[in-house]
Amino acid sequence: MAGRGSDADGQQYDATPYLPRRGGLAAHQRAAADCQGCPLYQDATGTVFGAGNPSARLMLVGEQPGDQEDRQGKPFVGPAGGLLRKALREAGLDEDQAYFTNAVKHFKFTVAARGKRRIHKPPSLREMTACRPWLAAELRLVDPEVVVALGATAGKALLGPSFRVTKDRGALIPLAEARAQGDGTQGAAHDGEAFVVATLHPAAILRAEDRETPYAGLLSDLRVAAGALT
């Protein structure tokens, strides 16, 4: 698709032209349904926008929708979402008071050689960057006090390309400081400072042979987020 933000291959890698000029989360969700800001829209069932409490103090940001999320049009409704919600409860966090979203709003996948099973494929930096305006809008409109970055892609979308899960996880990192690049993701309507807590993506835990240790790490990091909210 040619037009603003197009590259030499004719594909557009910028969601900015699709964002509404005004309106809240509902207006942005409607607009996101028509987003063609990168080529991922071509194969996905549809856009999976964020969902949850529109005035949440806690926002959880994952990488991208998975197979079940793509089919149902809602974030964190598959196995990884189930594990995350279990961990939230154990950490003393109310999932009904949280907002769930992803750094990339379309499911990127390859089809298995045999059968029709769709296999998750990580989004590229260009795809993540193209989708960043939607995440920036969600952060501005929800204006959370604590943002949990689930995995490397979410961490880089919030904290920049130097983010590493193993190095940065479990710490309270000021959101405004992290987004000093000025891409518009910081929002500070509330009196206090907003923080990012990075941790593992629950899907990575489900893929691990020994789930107990990484799950304990996820739980520990979520308790850091819970402590920042009290």
Image (tube, rainbow, N blue to C red):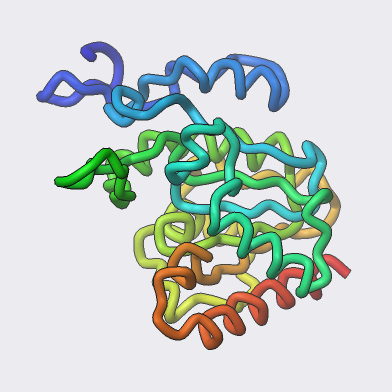
Question: Which quadrant of the structure image shows residue 37?
Answer: top left
Image coordinates for residue 34, horizontal then vertical, percent: 46, 15
Q: x and y percent of residue 221 in the render? A: 64, 76
Number of numbered discs present? 0
Residue 13 in view, yes or no: no
Residue 188: x %, y % from top left:
74, 47
Residue lying at the far front of the rendered structure: 115
Nearest the eye: 21 or 205? 205
Q: Which residue is drawn at 70% across and 22% down?
A: 26
User: What quarter of the picture does the N terminus occupy?
Assistant: top left
Q: In this view, does 213 lie above or below 139?
A: below
Q: Quadrant of the C terminus?
A: bottom right
Residue found at the very far left of the displayed protein: 8
Q: Quadrant of residue 15?
A: top left
Q: In this view, does 107 lie to the left or right of 58?
A: left
Left or right of 214: which side holds 36? left
Q: Is residue 128 above or below residue 150?
A: above
The residue closer to the viewer here, 150 or 77, is: 77
Give percent across and percent down for residue 144. Answer: 74, 50
Q: In this view, does 212 lie above or below 119?
A: below
In the picture, measured across the screen, residue 23 lies left or right of residue 34, that is right
Occupied quadrant, residue 50: top right
Residue located 50% across and 70% down the image: 200
Residue at 23% from the left image edge and 42% from the top image edge: 115
Task: Inspect this view and state whether residue 144 appears.
Answer: yes
Q: Nearer the viewer, residue 180 or 206?
A: 206
Q: Residue at x 21, y 22 (%)?
A: 11
Front position in the image: 223 or 178? 223
